Every structure is written in structure tokens, then in C-alpha cells.
Image (tube, rainbow, N blue to C red):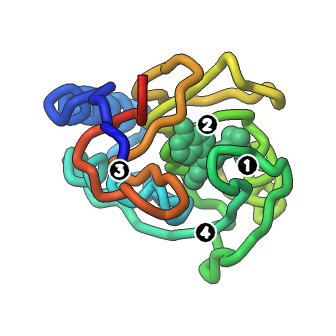
Amino acid sequence: MEKINVLINEARLEKRIEEIAKEIENDYKKEEEIIFLGILKGSVPFMWELSKKMKRSVQFEFIEVSSYKGTESTGEIVMHKDIKESIEEKNVIIVEDIIDTGRTLTYLKEHLLKKNPKSLKIATLLSKPSRRIQELHVDYVGFTIEDKFVVGFGLDYDQELRNLPYIGYIGD
Ligand code: IMP
Ligand code: MG
């Protein structure tokens, strides 16, 4: 196993996630329902930590799509699991681990808007803007990072290393 370097440690992750939770709280009225829609599988740790920092109830839904093989984007998006519950007239926040080319989120936004939510926002822990192929508006971004392949805190390398408690990168 190659050495894994720490890019964002646990303390920085926790602090930034708390800030995002506060931003979200301020953007919605107290009585409004909020659905966190996590993209499996990478969003799970971020969604859990973010929801724990929220001082109000949020609902959980999940959708599963994939576009990646190893470190190479195939460009093709496959839907493995759609949502069963209706999101019509609901406030939905898509929760994602990382936005890279933007293809996954562009596809998902279009797909979800057809279900007529009241509002649809995007929260991502990481963003690599230099890799963007599809321009897209992102409402909440944890950290903007350079073009490095990262692992941990939900992010995988061929399904491995999702359980690292920090964001790391392999090699130099
Ligand atoms: P996009 O459609 O190119 O924006 O890709 C988004 C998806 O690619 C993410 O949900 C991740 O699953 C995967 N991905 C992109 N960059 C990385 C990375 O650096 N490490 C691990 N997965 C990544
Ligand atoms: Mg993903």
C-alpha cells in the first residue's frame, strides 16, 4: 500500500462542516422541511456529520449513481437507485462528496427537477473547479481543492479507503 498524505485533517473537516450547517440553518425558515438527499456511497460520512451539526430535524433520502472506474472518469452516468418517496413541493439539498467534472450533478439536477421539488440546492464537501466540464451552480462548498485524486471521508479508490477519518491523497 502506498503512503497516504493528509490533505484535510479531522479538525478542519469538523470546523468547516459546522460552518456549513449554520449557513444551511440560516437559509431556511424554522418551520420548513429539509430533505438531505445523499448520493451513495461517498456522501454518507459528510451527510451524517453535517446533519449532526444541524440544530433542527432533517430528513434523509438516498440516490445511487456512478460514473467512475478507478481514477478515470468514464463520462457515463448510471443510475443504480432512484428515490422512492415523492419530493414534490419539498426543499431538497443534494449532498455530495466531491464535484469533479460536474457531469454527475448536472445529470442529477435535471433528473430531480422533473420531480418538482419546492427548491433544489447542492452541498458538496469538496470541489475541483479546474476539472469542470459542465458549469453548475453549487450552493454550499466545504473545500475547494486542486486537481488531486483524494480518498477518505467517504471518497474511494476502487471502493477502498472510504473509512479514513480525514481527506488524503496517494503518493506525492
Ligand atoms: P463528476 O461527475 O466528474 O463531477 O464526478 C463526481 C464523482 O466522481 C464523485 O461523486 C466521486 O465519486 C468521483 N470522484 C471525483 N474525483 C474524485 C477523487 O478525487 N477521489 C475519489 N472520487 C472522486
Ligand atoms: Mg460519488
Q: Residue at x 50, y 38 (%)?
A: 124
Amino acid at the residue labelled 4: Ile
Q: Are marks 2 and 4 in contact (CB under 8 Å)?
A: no
Q: Image quadrant of residue 4?
A: top left
Mark 1, residue position: 104
> Circle 2 is placed at which residue position?
99
Pointer 1 or 2: first along the chain: 2
Position of residue 14 measured from the top left corner of the image (x, y, whole percent): 19, 35
The label nearer to you, 4 versus 1, is: 1
The earlier-in-sequence mark between 4 and 1 is 4
Query: Is the residue marked 2 within 8 Å of ligand 1, measured from its CB?
Result: yes
Residue ID at (55%, 28%): 127
Total labels: the figure holds 4
Q: Residues within 10 Å of mark 2 (few under 14, many from 20)?
A: many
Is residue 24 shown above or below 96? above
Q: CA distance from mark 3 to mark 2?
A: 26 Å
For mark 3, what is the residue? 1
Q: Which residue is mark 4?
A: 63
